[in-house]
Image (cartoon, grey):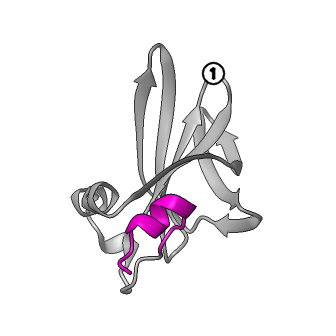
Amino acid sequence: MKPGADFSADYGVCFPITRQVPFLGLTSEQMFSILVFMTVSLNESVSVSAVFSSGAVKPVWFSRKGKQIQIEEIALVWKTREGSTPILHFSVTDGQGLYELRYNTVTLSWRLAACA
């Protein structure tokens, strides 16, 4: 079965990136391509440990299905709105998989939006 096939959509499985890719060496366009073309949409509520300092937010790890996932790198950060609510998006990696975390700045809640 290919990563991203029906099994992953049904069970919310995140497949790790199968080849070794140095995330620091990827351009933002390459990271965007991975997010757009290789993702499994999830929209799951997750617990996140984050550092809030000088108006910036930095997720450190998140917990999913009883497993703590340590964030090695934040690849991209962007902001959108859902109505009047600002949402911060973080494209993060644990060195094997790529994840999109969303932080709702009004409800102060985190969601795992997608993984690749």
Is residue 12 found left or right of 82 in the rendered image?
right
Quadrant including the C terminus: bottom left
Q: Which quarter of the rendering shows the N terminus?
A: bottom left
Asked whether 79 falls inside the magenta stretch, the response is: no
The boundaries of the magenta stretch are 1-15
Please, what secondary structure does the residue beneath circle 1 have?
Answer: loop
Q: Residue at x 24, y 59 (%)?
A: 33
The residue where tag 1 is placed is 106
- Does the rendering let one see residue 98? no
At 37% from the left and 79% from the top, the residue drawn is 22
Q: Position of residue 43 (x, y in %)?
A: 54, 45
Q: Main secondary structure of the magenta part?
A: loop
Please identify the quarter of the rendering in which residue 5 is found: bottom left
| Residue projecting furthest to the top | 84
Q: Nearer the viewer, residue 35 or 88?
A: 35
Q: Using a 10 Å C-alpha cutoff, classify the residue at mark 1 as few (fewer than 14 neighbours), some (14 to 19) or many (20 or more).
A: few
Residue at 49 percent across and 24 percent down: it is 86
- The one nearer the camera, 5 or 96, is 5
Q: Is residue 9 above or below residue 106?
A: below
Residue 58: percent from left, percent from top: 60, 48
